[in-house]
Amino acid sequence: MSKPLLQVRDLCIEFVLEDRTIEAVKGATFELAAGETLAIVGESGSGKSVTALALTRLLPVPPAEIKRGEILFDGKNVLTMDASQLRKLRGGRIAYIFQEPSTSLNPVYTVRSQIAEAVRLHRPDVTDVDAEVVRWLDAVGIVDPAKRMHDYPHQLSGGMQQRVMIAMALACQPDILVADEPTTALDVTIQAQIMELLASLKERFGMAVILITHNFGIVSGFASRVLVMYRGKIVEQGTTTEVLRAPKHAYTRALIDCIPQLGSTDKRLKTIDHAALDAA
Amino acid sequence: MITTAPEPIATVPATPGGRAWRRFRANKVGVTAMAMVIVLAVVALVFFVFDRLGIPFPMDPDATNLERKLLPPNAINWLGTDNLGRDVLSRLLNGAYISLTVGFVAVFVSLFIGVIVGAVSGYFGKWIDNLIMRAVDALMCFPTFFLILTAVALLGPSIFNIIFVIGLVSWTGTARLVRAEFLTLRESSYVQAARALGQRGWKIIFRHILPNAAAPILVTAVLGVPEAILAEAGLSFLGFGVQPPQATWGNIIADGKTYILDAWWLILFPGLAILLAALSFYLTGDALRQAVETRSERQ
């Protein structure tokens, strides 16, 4: 196998607060090959988003501090990059989509001008920026892109806003797309549409995807590999089928059990008993 | 059969500025005040041009006529004459441009400094913010008017000095406001998204944050104009403003105060002019604030 696109080794991240220090990520080690789909699953505060932001050093320093470890992208160490290298990496090689599409778009600019900004930033050789904007809006399934690109974010629905965010990320033609809970703020039918869109775009453009979620339900059809994080540690990783069929760690099992089943006779939704997990 | 006629859809402008303007237009007080501001500006400009072209309209503001001194308002001198027989109306109209120029340019100066200082302070935070804000605190400890007075006394009372001194001491409020806006906005998702896109720091400041802070900045700018007008009038009254024979609203009052018991028109009319100008700007600024402060659209 060729060298992986992204290698993270023993990554430790701390948040230094006034009165205490919180270890957000405790020695994460994983790899991502070009074109691969990896899901990072875990509950709120498990360190999954922090890990994702750390990939391009987007964490605010202070309070965050990368204590130990190594992040290699394409063989180059991200942790020793200077500001200009980082700017090329962000967006250009590793692009992000965030949880809340309605606030991730700048309210004072049209969709066109925001996607154009991304294009100009990372692909200065593109001459017809408008055509490029239309092309990407079309790719993410916006109907009548030539007209809709003149809309302001507040004129779009949540699902459409997220599509625009995806178009913005893809317009930079990144090698890795990090989707940080891309569907959490959307309702269930739109969630399915967005996940389908991501899957088809991945197929079409061949970039690697890191999907961050707390929902095992959307992982199974999408990711080839899963990484489960619990309290800052990677407690389990493997192929999606392996992990879903035979979870090794108690937390993974608990998380999978939390997916509500249609037709289940249980009166209550399952929750995770943290005390029992800690005791185990 | 019931046919539901399609509801007439009000055409809501798409741009945030367009919507604020629509709300502003619905405010009668604001529109009236803004119309007064425009009238004042036109009057000031017209009489400034007359002055430069040497057209004595309605009369030469500097022409003395001791036979007609201290006359109450009459058919020839609509607002009376002063102790040297100069026409008060002509002097008021002639002095209008001083007040408005000082008001606008001083605000521009203070805005320029305040926005840059506030943006740097709020965006970079940490020790930079601490350093700048402590400096602002120190500057705010001085009573502004006396600071202006001292500076003008040292530099000499020309209109440029007055404008720059007023601008240089009045940016602190703007800086604090801009800093506060930046502190909130730099944490917003779209700023995070811009950073994740690899955008440069100064581009994030000017392209992504500043336009979102434009509304409150515009409001303080408009509210800053009457402050500067009043400061100039105060300086002129104390003799530290633009020097005679050039008429300014402040020095007409200063000249008239000796005759306050005999010639009420020397105090009343320039006083009303100052009041009217300041009030128009205050009310415009207030209406603007109401129009832009619908926070729901900027979340």
Image (cartoon, helix red, strand yellow):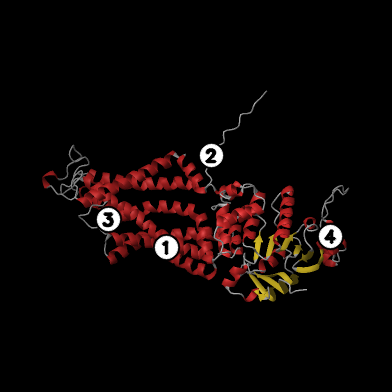
Real-space Cα separation, disc 4 to disc 1, in angstroms: 57 Å
The mark tally for this picture is 4
Residue A133 location, x and y as percent? 59, 55
| Amino acid, disc 3 | Ser
The quarter of the displayed image where residue A218 is located? bottom right
Residue A184 location, x and y as percent? 71, 54
Image quadrant for the C terminus of chain A?
bottom right
Residue density around tag 4, few if under 14, some if 14–19, many if 20 or more, within 10 Å: some
Residue B113, numbered circle? 1
Residue A153 location, x and y as percent? 59, 50
* Residue at screen point 75% across, 74% down: A2
| Amino acid, disc 4 | Ala
Real-space Cα separation, disc 2 to disc 1, in angstroms: 39 Å
| Amino acid, disc 2 | Thr
Instruction: Give the mark nearer the N terminus: 2 vs 3.
Output: 2
Q: Which residue is mark 3?
A: B236
Of marks 4 and 2, the one in the foreground: 2
Residue A254, numbered circle? 4
B28 lies left or right of B148: right
Q: Secondary structure at mark 4?
A: helix
Real-space Cα separation, disc 1 to disc 3, in angstroms: 25 Å
Residue density around tag 1, few if under 14, some if 14–19, many if 20 or more, within 10 Å: some
Residue B11, numbered circle? 2
